[in-house]
Image (cartoon, rainbow, N blue to C red):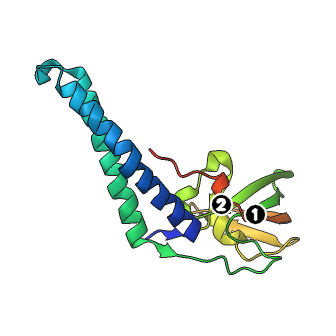
Amino acid sequence: MHDKLTRGDIRKMEEEIQYRRLELRPKLLQSLKEARAHGDLSENFEYYAAKREKNRNESRIRYLENMVKTAIIIEDDTKKDQVGINNLVTVHFEEDNEDDTFKIVTTIRSDVTKNLISIDSPMGKALLRKKEGDRVEIKTETGYVYHVVIKKIEKIKDEDKDVINPY
């Protein structure tokens, strides 16, 4: 499956790839070389730990390269008064009589614990392109339906506030 990513997502992934190739890889190779020099590999925990870290780094590089290669690049083509990617959106949950603020992000950056809501989630899909004051119906995948009212939309240009998890 191809992930929908912004140019900022791609840039961050490319930066991480470069860091892992040019800075982290040489350090991990040196650690592996030093651990191997300690002798008998069958009982050398340092060697196996260093090898595991090297393999983890290589795996992450392959994963990121594949993500960049297969990504569908999307642009935020919403108007100034509409909910779009990287916007902070304050909504009022009618059922609970509570307000909460979410940031609308691409799937790879979503993290519900940090109120980062994916554009492909039920709430993200429902809120995209809506305006302040709109009453929005959100249908979950289980069939549950609830309503929110958009109270505030704040356009955010700084995608760097959210970091893609390295592991």
Name the residue at 62% across, 62% down. Answer: 140
Read off the residue under disc 2. Answer: 159
Residue picked out by circle 1: 156
Whole-percent x and y of residue 100? 80, 52
Packing grade of label 1 (10 A; few <14, some 14-19, many >=20) is few
**Which residue sits at x=24%, y=32%?**
32
What quarter of the picture does the N terminus occupy?
A: bottom left
Residue at 13 percent of width and 24 percent of height: 41
Left or right position of 94 against 107: right
Q: In the image, residue 56 lies at what x, y percent?
A: 32, 43
Q: Amino acid at mark 1?
A: Ile
Q: Is residue 43 above or below residue 32?
A: above
Identify the disc placed on residue 86: none
One can see residue 139 in this view: no
Position of 41 relative to 5 (above/below)? above
Residue at (81% x, 55% y) in the render: 95
Q: Mark 2 to mark 1: distance in Å?
A: 8 Å
Left or right? Give the position of 85 relative to 110. right
Q: Is residue 42 left or right of 85 when viewed as pictured?
A: left
